[in-house]
Image (spheres, grey):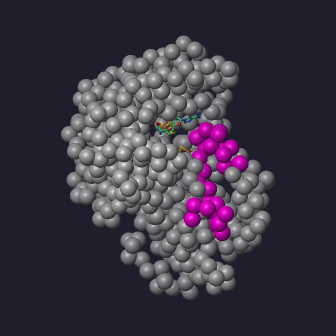
Protein backbone atom coordinates (compact mmCIF):
# COMPACT_ATOMS: atom_id res chain seq x y z
CA UNK A 1 0.00 0.00 0.00
CA UNK A 2 1.25 3.50 -0.81
CA UNK A 3 2.87 5.14 2.20
CA UNK A 4 4.92 2.00 2.87
CA UNK A 5 6.71 2.30 -0.49
CA UNK A 6 10.38 3.21 -0.46
CA UNK A 7 10.92 4.39 -4.02
CA UNK A 8 14.69 4.38 -3.69
CA UNK A 9 14.67 0.64 -3.04
CA UNK A 10 13.00 -0.20 -6.33
CA UNK A 11 15.44 -1.91 -8.67
CA UNK A 12 15.38 0.01 -11.95
CA UNK A 13 17.66 -2.49 -13.65
CA UNK A 14 14.77 -4.94 -13.69
CA UNK A 15 11.93 -4.68 -16.20
CA UNK A 16 8.93 -2.65 -14.99
CA UNK A 17 6.24 -4.74 -13.22
CA UNK A 18 3.07 -5.38 -15.21
CA UNK A 19 0.60 -5.09 -12.31
CA UNK A 20 -0.74 -1.78 -10.99
CA UNK A 21 -0.02 0.25 -8.95
CA UNK A 22 3.45 -1.37 -8.67
CA UNK A 23 4.20 -0.43 -12.24
CA UNK A 24 3.62 3.25 -11.46
CA UNK A 25 5.77 3.05 -8.30
CA UNK A 26 8.56 1.81 -10.59
CA UNK A 27 8.14 4.81 -12.89
CA UNK A 28 8.00 7.25 -9.95
CA UNK A 29 11.37 5.78 -8.89
CA UNK A 30 12.63 6.29 -12.43
CA UNK A 31 11.45 9.93 -12.41
CA UNK A 32 13.31 10.40 -9.12
CA UNK A 33 16.48 9.40 -10.90
CA UNK A 34 15.79 11.98 -13.61
CA UNK A 35 15.09 14.63 -10.95
CA UNK A 36 18.41 13.87 -9.20
CA UNK A 37 20.26 14.29 -12.51
CA UNK A 38 18.49 17.62 -13.06
CA UNK A 39 19.47 18.76 -9.58
CA UNK A 40 23.10 17.81 -10.14
CA UNK A 41 23.27 19.70 -13.42
CA UNK A 42 21.23 22.77 -12.49
CA UNK A 43 22.06 23.10 -8.81
CA UNK A 44 18.37 23.12 -7.89
CA UNK A 45 15.35 20.82 -7.93
CA UNK A 46 12.96 21.07 -10.91
CA UNK A 47 9.81 23.02 -10.09
CA UNK A 48 6.38 21.73 -11.14
CA UNK A 49 3.02 23.49 -11.27
CA UNK A 50 -0.38 21.78 -11.49
CA UNK A 51 -3.29 23.99 -12.58
CA UNK A 52 -6.84 22.81 -12.23
CA UNK A 53 -9.68 24.14 -14.36
CA UNK A 54 -12.62 21.91 -13.52
CA UNK A 55 -15.00 20.64 -10.88
CA UNK A 56 -14.27 18.99 -7.51
CA UNK A 57 -13.54 15.71 -9.26
CA UNK A 58 -10.91 17.38 -11.39
CA UNK A 59 -9.51 19.06 -8.28
CA UNK A 60 -9.11 15.62 -6.70
CA UNK A 61 -7.33 14.41 -9.86
CA UNK A 62 -5.03 17.45 -9.63
CA UNK A 63 -4.08 16.36 -6.10
CA UNK A 64 -3.11 12.97 -7.53
CA UNK A 65 -0.94 14.64 -10.19
CA UNK A 66 0.73 16.78 -7.51
CA UNK A 67 1.22 13.69 -5.35
CA UNK A 68 3.05 11.85 -8.12
CA UNK A 69 5.22 14.89 -8.94
CA UNK A 70 6.01 15.41 -5.27
CA UNK A 71 6.95 11.74 -4.82
CA UNK A 72 9.15 12.01 -7.89
CA UNK A 73 11.08 14.78 -6.12
CA UNK A 74 9.77 17.92 -7.81
CA UNK A 75 9.30 21.08 -5.84
CA UNK A 76 5.59 21.97 -6.16
CA UNK A 77 4.90 25.63 -6.92
CA UNK A 78 1.89 27.76 -7.87
CA UNK A 79 4.04 29.77 -10.27
CA UNK A 80 3.39 28.78 -13.88
CA UNK A 81 6.88 29.91 -14.88
CA UNK A 82 8.19 26.48 -13.83
CA UNK A 83 10.11 23.53 -15.28
CA UNK A 84 7.00 21.41 -15.67
CA UNK A 85 3.46 22.77 -15.98
CA UNK A 86 0.38 20.61 -16.32
CA UNK A 87 -3.12 21.90 -17.06
CA UNK A 88 -5.90 19.64 -15.82
CA UNK A 89 -8.65 20.82 -18.14
CA UNK A 90 -12.46 21.04 -18.15
CA UNK A 91 -14.76 21.09 -21.17
CA UNK A 92 -18.22 21.33 -19.61
CA UNK A 93 -18.78 24.74 -21.26
CA UNK A 94 -16.90 26.39 -24.09
CA UNK A 95 -15.53 29.20 -21.90
CA UNK A 96 -13.62 26.56 -19.90
CA UNK A 97 -11.83 25.57 -23.13
CA UNK A 98 -11.16 29.15 -24.18
CA UNK A 99 -9.50 29.86 -20.84
CA UNK A 100 -7.07 26.99 -21.43
CA UNK A 101 -6.15 28.11 -24.95
CA UNK A 102 -5.57 31.67 -23.72
CA UNK A 103 -3.28 30.56 -20.92
CA UNK A 104 -1.36 28.16 -23.15
CA UNK A 105 -0.16 31.21 -25.07
CA UNK A 106 1.34 32.62 -21.88
CA UNK A 107 3.06 29.29 -21.14
CA UNK A 108 4.61 29.34 -24.59
CA UNK A 109 6.21 32.67 -23.67
CA UNK A 110 7.72 31.17 -20.49
CA UNK A 111 8.92 28.17 -22.44
CA UNK A 112 10.82 30.30 -24.92
CA UNK A 113 12.84 31.67 -22.02
CA UNK A 114 13.34 28.32 -20.30
CA UNK A 115 14.46 25.60 -22.73
CA UNK A 116 14.17 22.99 -19.94
CA UNK A 117 10.48 23.65 -19.51
CA UNK A 118 7.89 20.99 -20.41
CA UNK A 119 4.16 21.56 -20.82
CA UNK A 120 1.45 18.91 -20.37
CA UNK A 121 -2.31 18.84 -20.83
CA UNK A 122 -4.75 16.32 -19.39
CA UNK A 123 -8.34 16.16 -18.14
CA UNK A 124 -11.70 16.33 -19.84
CA UNK A 125 -10.78 18.54 -22.82
CA UNK A 126 -8.19 16.08 -24.09
CA UNK A 127 -10.84 13.33 -24.33
CA UNK A 128 -12.32 15.20 -27.29
CA UNK A 129 -10.82 14.27 -30.64
CA UNK A 130 -11.17 17.79 -32.07
CA UNK A 131 -9.18 19.25 -29.15
CA UNK A 132 -6.32 16.81 -29.63
CA UNK A 133 -6.27 17.54 -33.37
CA UNK A 134 -6.11 21.28 -32.67
CA UNK A 135 -3.33 20.86 -30.10
CA UNK A 136 -1.32 18.68 -32.46
CA UNK A 137 -1.62 21.18 -35.26
CA UNK A 138 -1.38 24.57 -33.59
CA UNK A 139 0.28 24.01 -30.20
CA UNK A 140 3.56 22.24 -30.96
CA UNK A 141 5.07 23.33 -27.64
CA UNK A 142 2.76 21.01 -25.66
CA UNK A 143 4.97 18.01 -24.80
CA UNK A 144 2.54 15.59 -23.18
CA UNK A 145 -1.17 15.01 -23.73
CA UNK A 146 -3.20 12.36 -21.92
CA UNK A 147 -6.81 11.89 -20.86
CA UNK A 148 -9.03 11.12 -17.89
CA UNK A 149 -8.97 7.30 -18.16
CA UNK A 150 -5.19 6.89 -17.96
CA UNK A 151 -4.39 9.54 -15.37
CA UNK A 152 -3.05 6.82 -13.07
CA UNK A 153 -0.27 6.25 -15.64
CA UNK A 154 1.04 9.80 -15.24
CA UNK A 155 4.46 8.72 -13.85
CA UNK A 156 4.97 6.34 -16.76
CA UNK A 157 3.98 8.99 -19.31
CA UNK A 158 6.30 11.51 -17.68
CA UNK A 159 9.22 9.08 -18.07
CA UNK A 160 8.21 8.43 -21.65
CA UNK A 161 8.16 12.18 -22.36
CA UNK A 162 11.64 12.77 -20.91
CA UNK A 163 12.94 9.61 -22.58
CA UNK A 164 11.60 10.28 -26.06
CA UNK A 165 12.56 13.94 -26.35
CA UNK A 166 9.50 14.39 -28.56
CA UNK A 167 5.81 14.77 -27.94
CA UNK A 168 3.84 12.00 -26.21
CA UNK A 169 0.08 11.65 -26.80
CA UNK A 170 -1.90 8.91 -25.06
CA UNK A 171 -5.69 9.06 -25.02
CA UNK A 172 -7.93 6.11 -24.14
CA UNK A 173 -11.50 5.76 -25.38
CA UNK A 174 -12.70 4.42 -22.04
CA UNK A 175 -11.82 2.11 -19.18
CA UNK A 176 -13.37 -0.21 -16.63
CA UNK A 177 -10.32 0.04 -14.36
CA UNK A 178 -9.94 1.84 -11.06
CA UNK A 179 -6.34 2.00 -9.88
CA UNK A 180 -6.01 2.78 -6.17
CA UNK A 181 -3.13 3.66 -3.89
CA UNK A 182 -1.23 6.28 -5.80
CA UNK A 183 0.35 9.20 -3.97
CA UNK A 184 -1.85 12.23 -3.31
CA UNK A 185 -0.74 15.71 -2.30
CA UNK A 186 -3.72 17.31 -0.55
CA UNK A 187 -4.39 21.02 -0.83
CA UNK A 188 -5.77 21.19 2.73
CA UNK A 189 -4.40 19.01 5.55
CA UNK A 190 -7.76 18.98 7.36
CA UNK A 191 -10.27 18.30 4.56
CA UNK A 192 -10.33 16.09 1.51
CA UNK A 193 -12.41 14.96 -1.43
CA UNK A 194 -12.82 11.22 -1.99
CA UNK A 195 -13.98 9.72 -5.26
CA UNK A 196 -16.71 7.22 -4.61
CA UNK A 197 -17.55 6.72 -8.27
CA UNK A 198 -16.29 7.74 -11.68
CA UNK A 199 -18.06 8.58 -14.93
CA UNK A 200 -21.76 9.11 -15.61
CA UNK A 201 -24.50 7.14 -17.39
CA UNK A 202 -27.22 9.77 -17.37
CA UNK A 203 -26.60 11.42 -20.73
CA UNK A 204 -28.41 14.67 -20.03
CA UNK A 205 -28.74 15.92 -23.59
CA UNK A 206 -26.61 19.07 -23.09
CA UNK A 207 -23.78 17.43 -21.19
CA UNK A 208 -20.35 16.29 -22.36
CA UNK A 209 -19.33 14.61 -19.08
CA UNK A 210 -20.48 11.04 -19.96
CA UNK A 211 -18.40 11.26 -23.16
CA UNK A 212 -15.22 12.49 -21.52
CA UNK A 213 -15.46 10.63 -18.20
CA UNK A 214 -16.86 7.36 -19.46
CA UNK A 215 -19.36 4.91 -17.98
CA UNK A 216 -20.39 5.01 -14.36
CA UNK A 217 -18.10 2.92 -12.10
CA UNK A 218 -18.44 2.77 -8.31
CA UNK A 219 -15.50 2.06 -6.06
CA UNK A 220 -15.76 -0.84 -3.62
CA UNK A 221 -17.13 0.39 -0.27
CA UNK A 222 -14.26 -1.18 1.69
CA UNK A 223 -11.73 0.74 -0.45
CA UNK A 224 -13.56 4.02 0.19
CA UNK A 225 -13.82 3.39 3.93
CA UNK A 226 -10.16 2.35 4.14
CA UNK A 227 -9.15 5.58 2.39
CA UNK A 228 -11.27 7.71 4.74
CA UNK A 229 -9.92 5.91 7.81
CA UNK A 230 -6.41 6.62 6.59
CA UNK A 231 -7.27 10.29 6.01
CA UNK A 232 -8.79 10.54 9.49
CA UNK A 233 -5.55 9.11 10.86
CA UNK A 234 -3.70 11.92 9.11
CA UNK A 235 -5.87 14.59 10.71
CA UNK A 236 -8.62 15.06 8.12
CA UNK A 237 -11.86 16.13 9.83
CA UNK A 238 -14.08 16.89 6.81
CA UNK A 239 -14.62 14.65 3.80
CA UNK A 240 -16.50 15.30 0.59
CA UNK A 241 -17.70 12.18 -1.23
CA UNK A 242 -17.45 12.84 -4.96
CA UNK A 243 -19.34 11.53 -7.97
CA UNK A 244 -21.39 12.95 -10.84
CA UNK A 245 -24.45 11.25 -9.43
CA UNK A 246 -23.73 10.00 -5.92
CA UNK A 247 -27.33 8.88 -5.40
CA UNK A 248 -26.83 6.00 -7.80
CA UNK A 249 -23.68 4.83 -5.98
CA UNK A 250 -23.19 1.07 -5.81
CA UNK A 251 -25.60 0.12 -8.59
CA UNK A 252 -22.92 -1.56 -10.72
CA UNK A 253 -21.24 -3.37 -7.83
CA UNK A 254 -21.77 -7.03 -7.01
CA UNK A 255 -23.26 -7.12 -3.50
CA UNK A 256 -23.27 -3.35 -3.74
CA UNK A 257 -24.53 -1.12 -0.97
CA UNK A 258 -26.63 2.01 -1.48
CA UNK A 259 -25.31 5.54 -1.08
CA UNK A 260 -27.34 5.92 2.12
CA UNK A 261 -25.72 2.77 3.53
CA UNK A 262 -22.28 4.02 2.55
CA UNK A 263 -22.96 7.27 4.43
CA UNK A 264 -23.95 5.29 7.52
CA UNK A 265 -20.57 3.54 7.41
CA UNK A 266 -18.62 6.78 6.89
CA UNK A 267 -20.46 8.25 9.89
CA UNK A 268 -18.90 5.57 12.11
CA UNK A 269 -15.32 6.58 11.29
CA UNK A 270 -13.69 8.16 14.29
CA UNK A 271 -12.05 11.53 13.73
CA UNK A 272 -14.33 12.50 10.84
CA UNK A 273 -16.50 15.38 12.04
CA UNK A 274 -18.16 16.55 8.84
CA UNK A 275 -19.41 14.71 5.76
CA UNK A 276 -20.35 16.42 2.50
CA UNK A 277 -21.19 14.96 -0.90
CA UNK A 278 -21.60 16.09 -4.46
CA UNK A 279 -23.60 15.83 -6.74
CA UNK A 280 -27.10 14.52 -6.11
CA UNK A 281 -29.37 13.87 -9.06
CA UNK A 282 -32.99 14.63 -8.09
CA UNK A 283 -34.33 11.54 -9.88
CA UNK A 284 -32.35 9.17 -7.60
CA UNK A 285 -32.63 10.86 -4.21
CA UNK A 286 -34.23 8.22 -1.97
CA UNK A 287 -36.28 8.47 1.22
CA UNK A 288 -33.62 6.31 2.83
CA UNK A 289 -31.06 9.03 2.07
CA UNK A 290 -33.27 11.75 3.58
CA UNK A 291 -33.62 9.59 6.70
CA UNK A 292 -29.86 9.06 6.98
CA UNK A 293 -29.21 12.80 6.57
CA UNK A 294 -31.83 13.58 9.19
CA UNK A 295 -30.40 11.20 11.78
CA UNK A 296 -26.78 12.01 11.11
CA UNK A 297 -24.60 14.02 13.47
CA UNK A 298 -21.94 14.51 10.82
CA UNK A 299 -23.61 15.06 7.44
CA UNK A 300 -23.56 18.79 6.71
CA UNK A 301 -26.76 20.79 6.41
CA UNK A 302 -26.19 21.46 2.75
CA UNK A 303 -27.60 19.69 -0.27
CA UNK A 304 -26.66 20.59 -3.84
CA UNK A 305 -29.60 19.53 -5.98
CA UNK A 306 -29.26 20.68 -9.62
CA UNK A 307 -32.57 21.78 -11.13
CA UNK A 308 -31.31 22.84 -14.62
CA UNK A 309 -34.79 24.00 -15.66
CA UNK A 310 -38.25 24.42 -14.15
CA UNK A 311 -40.10 23.72 -17.41
CA UNK A 312 -41.37 20.18 -17.95
CA UNK A 313 -40.94 20.50 -21.69
CA UNK A 314 -37.29 21.55 -21.36
CA UNK A 315 -36.57 19.00 -18.62
CA UNK A 316 -37.82 16.31 -20.99
CA UNK A 317 -35.65 17.60 -23.84
CA UNK A 318 -32.72 17.71 -21.42
CA UNK A 319 -33.37 14.04 -20.52
CA UNK A 320 -33.39 14.87 -16.80
CA UNK A 321 -36.13 12.34 -16.03
CA UNK A 322 -38.09 14.34 -13.43
CA UNK A 323 -40.83 16.97 -13.69
CA UNK A 324 -41.15 20.36 -12.05
CA UNK A 325 -43.78 18.93 -9.74
CA UNK A 326 -41.61 15.98 -8.70
CA UNK A 327 -38.66 18.30 -8.02
CA UNK A 328 -40.80 20.63 -5.90
CA UNK A 329 -42.30 17.70 -3.99
CA UNK A 330 -38.78 16.43 -3.27
CA UNK A 331 -37.49 19.75 -1.94
CA UNK A 332 -40.64 20.16 0.17
CA UNK A 333 -40.09 16.73 1.67
CA UNK A 334 -36.44 17.56 2.47
CA UNK A 335 -37.37 20.87 4.10
CA UNK A 336 -40.14 19.18 6.08
CA UNK A 337 -37.83 16.47 7.40
CA UNK A 338 -34.71 18.62 7.84
CA UNK A 339 -35.80 22.28 8.20
CA UNK A 340 -32.27 23.69 8.55
CA UNK A 341 -31.02 22.09 5.33
CA UNK A 342 -29.53 24.65 2.92
CA UNK A 343 -30.36 23.76 -0.68
CA UNK A 344 -28.29 25.00 -3.62
CA UNK A 345 -28.66 24.32 -7.33
CA UNK A 346 -27.40 24.61 -10.92
CA UNK A 347 -29.53 26.24 -13.62
CA UNK A 348 -29.03 26.40 -17.38
CA UNK A 349 -30.58 29.24 -19.38
CA UNK A 350 -30.85 29.16 -23.17
CA UNK A 351 -31.20 25.42 -23.78
CA UNK A 352 -32.38 24.89 -27.41
CA UNK A 353 -36.08 25.63 -27.78
CA UNK A 354 -36.37 27.45 -24.45
CA UNK A 355 -38.97 30.23 -24.57
CA UNK A 356 -39.48 33.16 -22.16
CA UNK A 357 -42.41 31.14 -20.73
CA UNK A 358 -40.05 28.26 -19.91
CA UNK A 359 -37.75 30.72 -18.13
CA UNK A 360 -40.73 31.86 -16.03
CA UNK A 361 -41.25 28.24 -14.95
CA UNK A 362 -37.62 28.16 -13.76
CA UNK A 363 -38.11 31.43 -11.87
CA UNK A 364 -41.23 29.99 -10.29
CA UNK A 365 -39.19 27.07 -8.89
CA UNK A 366 -36.49 29.46 -7.57
CA UNK A 367 -39.19 31.45 -5.74
CA UNK A 368 -40.81 28.33 -4.32
CA UNK A 369 -37.65 26.50 -3.23
CA UNK A 370 -35.78 29.58 -1.99
CA UNK A 371 -32.27 28.41 -2.72
CA UNK A 372 -29.37 29.41 -0.50
CA UNK A 373 -27.29 29.73 -3.64
CA UNK A 374 -27.57 28.84 -7.33
CA UNK A 375 -25.03 28.64 -10.11
CA UNK A 376 -26.58 29.97 -13.29
CA UNK A 377 -25.05 29.03 -16.63
CA UNK A 378 -25.73 30.06 -20.20
CA UNK A 379 -26.23 26.96 -22.33
CA UNK A 380 -23.08 26.05 -24.22
CA UNK A 381 -23.30 23.75 -27.24
CA UNK A 382 -21.04 20.69 -26.84
CA UNK A 383 -20.09 18.75 -29.96
CA UNK A 384 -21.30 15.15 -29.87
CA UNK A 385 -24.13 15.67 -27.39
CA UNK A 386 -27.78 15.13 -28.36
CA UNK A 387 -28.66 18.81 -27.90
CA UNK A 388 -25.90 19.95 -30.28
CA UNK A 389 -28.17 19.38 -33.28
CA UNK A 390 -31.14 21.25 -31.80
CA UNK A 391 -32.17 24.75 -32.86
CA UNK A 392 -30.38 27.43 -30.78
CA UNK A 393 -32.16 30.26 -28.95
CA UNK A 394 -31.26 33.77 -30.23
CA UNK A 395 -28.51 35.33 -28.11
CA UNK A 396 -30.57 38.36 -27.10
CA UNK A 397 -33.36 36.16 -25.75
CA UNK A 398 -30.84 34.06 -23.83
CA UNK A 399 -29.25 37.17 -22.28
CA UNK A 400 -32.62 38.51 -21.14
CA UNK A 401 -33.62 35.22 -19.54
CA UNK A 402 -30.21 34.82 -17.93
CA UNK A 403 -30.26 38.30 -16.36
CA UNK A 404 -33.76 37.71 -15.01
CA UNK A 405 -32.88 34.31 -13.52
CA UNK A 406 -29.66 35.66 -12.02
CA UNK A 407 -31.45 38.54 -10.35
CA UNK A 408 -34.10 36.25 -8.89
CA UNK A 409 -31.45 33.83 -7.62
CA UNK A 410 -29.42 36.61 -6.00
CA UNK A 411 -32.43 38.21 -4.33
CA UNK A 412 -33.66 34.94 -2.82
CA UNK A 413 -30.16 33.77 -1.80
CA UNK A 414 -29.48 37.08 -0.03
CA UNK A 415 -32.72 36.74 1.87
CA UNK A 416 -32.04 33.11 2.80
CA UNK A 417 -28.53 33.78 4.03
CA UNK A 418 -29.62 36.85 6.03
CA UNK A 419 -31.78 34.67 8.26
CA UNK A 420 -28.70 33.37 10.11
CA UNK A 421 -27.87 36.86 11.41
CA UNK A 422 -27.39 36.92 15.20
CA UNK A 423 -26.95 33.13 15.46
CA UNK A 424 -23.84 31.38 16.73
CA UNK A 425 -22.69 28.49 14.57
CA UNK A 426 -19.75 26.16 14.33
CA UNK A 427 -17.25 26.93 11.56
CA UNK A 428 -14.32 24.92 10.27
CA UNK A 429 -11.49 27.42 9.80
CA UNK A 430 -10.16 26.97 6.27
CA UNK A 431 -7.62 29.71 5.70
CA UNK A 432 -6.19 33.09 6.56
CA UNK A 433 -7.76 35.80 4.46
CA UNK A 434 -5.09 38.16 3.26
CA UNK A 435 -7.17 39.94 0.64
CA UNK A 436 -7.34 43.69 0.19
CA UNK A 437 -10.32 44.23 2.44
CA UNK A 438 -9.11 42.11 5.33
CA UNK A 439 -7.58 44.94 7.38
CA UNK A 440 -10.76 46.98 7.01
CA UNK A 441 -12.87 44.02 8.19
CA UNK A 442 -10.51 43.45 11.13
CA UNK A 443 -10.88 47.06 12.20
CA UNK A 444 -14.67 46.91 11.88
CA UNK A 445 -14.82 43.78 13.99
CA UNK A 446 -12.65 45.31 16.72
CA UNK A 447 -9.84 42.78 16.24
CA UNK A 448 -7.02 42.71 18.78
CA UNK A 449 -3.33 43.32 18.12
CA UNK A 450 -1.74 40.56 16.01
CA UNK A 451 -5.05 38.98 14.99
CA UNK A 452 -5.61 37.94 11.37
CA UNK A 453 -8.83 37.57 9.39
CA UNK A 454 -9.82 33.93 9.19
CA UNK A 455 -12.21 32.33 6.71
CA UNK A 456 -14.44 29.58 8.00
CA UNK A 457 -17.19 27.44 6.50
CA UNK A 458 -20.43 26.64 8.29
CA UNK A 459 -22.12 23.28 8.03
CA UNK A 460 -24.62 24.88 5.62
CA UNK A 461 -21.69 25.90 3.38
CA UNK A 462 -21.96 29.63 4.14
CA UNK A 463 -18.64 31.45 4.49
CA UNK A 464 -17.84 33.59 7.53
CA UNK A 465 -14.83 35.86 8.10
CA UNK A 466 -13.72 36.62 11.67
CA UNK A 467 -10.61 37.67 13.60
CA UNK A 468 -8.41 34.97 15.09
CA UNK A 469 -4.96 33.44 14.91
CA UNK A 470 -3.22 31.42 12.20
CA UNK A 471 -3.01 28.40 14.50
CA UNK A 472 -6.79 28.06 14.34
CA UNK A 473 -6.75 26.96 10.69
CA UNK A 474 -8.09 23.40 10.52
CA UNK A 475 -9.98 23.63 13.82
CA UNK A 476 -13.65 24.13 14.67
CA UNK A 477 -14.70 27.35 16.37
CA UNK A 478 -18.04 28.84 17.39
CA UNK A 479 -18.70 32.07 15.56
CA UNK A 480 -21.31 34.71 16.28
CA UNK A 481 -22.71 35.80 12.90
CA UNK A 482 -22.67 39.52 13.36
CA UNK A 483 -23.25 41.05 9.98
CA UNK A 484 -24.56 39.57 6.73
CA UNK A 485 -22.70 40.92 3.70
CA UNK A 486 -24.84 39.56 0.90
CA UNK A 487 -23.50 36.06 0.42
CA UNK A 488 -21.12 35.81 3.39
CA UNK A 489 -20.87 36.87 7.03
CA UNK A 490 -18.59 38.90 9.22
CA UNK A 491 -18.44 37.45 12.71
CA UNK A 492 -16.57 37.09 15.97
CA UNK A 493 -15.60 33.96 17.89
CA UNK A 494 -17.45 33.27 21.14
N1 LIG B 1 -23.28 15.76 -12.47
C1 LIG B 1 -23.70 17.01 -12.07
C2 LIG B 1 -23.23 18.19 -12.86
C3 LIG B 1 -21.94 18.21 -13.57
S1 LIG B 1 -21.66 19.57 -14.60
C4 LIG B 1 -25.21 17.00 -12.14
O1 LIG B 1 -25.82 16.28 -12.85
O2 LIG B 1 -25.77 17.82 -11.47
C5 LIG B 1 -22.05 20.95 -13.58
C6 LIG B 1 -23.11 21.84 -14.11
O3 LIG B 1 -22.71 22.42 -15.33
C7 LIG B 1 -24.42 21.16 -14.43
O4 LIG B 1 -25.23 20.97 -13.34
C8 LIG B 1 -25.04 22.09 -15.45
O5 LIG B 1 -25.85 23.06 -14.82
C9 LIG B 1 -23.85 22.77 -16.08
N2 LIG B 1 -23.67 22.34 -17.47
C10 LIG B 1 -23.37 21.11 -17.91
N3 LIG B 1 -23.32 21.10 -19.26
C11 LIG B 1 -23.58 22.36 -19.67
C12 LIG B 1 -23.69 22.99 -20.95
N4 LIG B 1 -23.52 22.31 -22.07
N5 LIG B 1 -23.98 24.31 -20.99
C13 LIG B 1 -24.17 25.02 -19.85
N6 LIG B 1 -24.10 24.47 -18.63
C14 LIG B 1 -23.81 23.16 -18.53
FE1 LIG C 1 -23.86 15.62 -16.97
FE2 LIG C 1 -26.29 14.84 -16.38
FE3 LIG C 1 -24.23 13.25 -15.83
FE4 LIG C 1 -24.58 15.47 -14.44
S1 LIG C 1 -25.97 13.71 -14.47
S2 LIG C 1 -22.68 14.74 -15.31
S3 LIG C 1 -25.41 16.87 -15.95
S4 LIG C 1 -24.95 13.84 -17.85
FE1 LIG D 1 -15.43 19.81 -16.25
FE2 LIG D 1 -14.75 17.33 -16.49
FE3 LIG D 1 -15.66 18.20 -14.20
S1 LIG D 1 -15.80 18.52 -18.01
S2 LIG D 1 -17.05 19.82 -14.79
S3 LIG D 1 -13.81 18.85 -15.17
S4 LIG D 1 -15.97 16.19 -15.05
Classify the position of ligand 3 by quadrant: top left, top right, bottom left or bottom right: top right
Vertical placement of 39 versus 313: above or below?
below
443 or 42, which lies in front?
443
Q: Which residues make up the magenta segment?
A: 77-102
Q: Quadrant of residue 479?
A: top left
Residue 75 in view here: yes
Q: Looking at the image, how many numbered discs can be counted on the residues? A: 0
Residue 114 highlighted magenta (yes or no): no
Q: Is residue 117 above or below residue 102?
A: below
Q: Is residue 291 left or right of residue 344?
A: left
Any part of residue 464 in sight: no
Q: Is residue 93 magenta?
A: yes
Q: Nearer the viewer, residue 125 or 218?
A: 125
Q: Which corner quadrant holds the N terminus?
A: bottom left
Q: Position of residue 483 (x, y in %)?
A: 37, 35
Name the residue: 42% across, 24% down. Answer: 412
Instruction: Point out residue 417 in the picture as x, y percentages from the top left corner.
Output: 37, 31
Q: Residue at x 66, y 46 (%)?
A: 99
Residue placed at 66% from the left, 49% from the top?
100
In the image shown, does 366 or 163 lie closer to the viewer? Answer: 366
Picture coordinates of residue 130, whole percent (x, y): 71, 46
Q: Looking at the image, which residue is at 79% across and 53% down?
A: 138
Quarter of the view holding residue 164? bottom right
What residue occupies the far top of the structure in this picture? 357
Amino acid sequence: MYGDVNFDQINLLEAPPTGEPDRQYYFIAKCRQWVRDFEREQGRRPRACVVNFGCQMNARDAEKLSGILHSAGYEITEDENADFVIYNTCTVRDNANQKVYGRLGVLNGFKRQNPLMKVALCGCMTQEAQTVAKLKESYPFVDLIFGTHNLYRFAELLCEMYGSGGRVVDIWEGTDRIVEDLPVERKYPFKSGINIMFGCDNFCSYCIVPYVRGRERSREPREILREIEKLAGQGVVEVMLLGQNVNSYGKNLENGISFAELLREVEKIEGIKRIRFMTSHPKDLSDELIQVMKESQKICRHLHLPLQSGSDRILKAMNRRYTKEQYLALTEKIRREIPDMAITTDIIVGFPGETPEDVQETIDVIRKVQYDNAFTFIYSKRTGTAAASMEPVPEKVVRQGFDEVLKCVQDTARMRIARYQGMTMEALVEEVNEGQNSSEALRELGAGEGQVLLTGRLSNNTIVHFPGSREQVGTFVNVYLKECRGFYYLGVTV
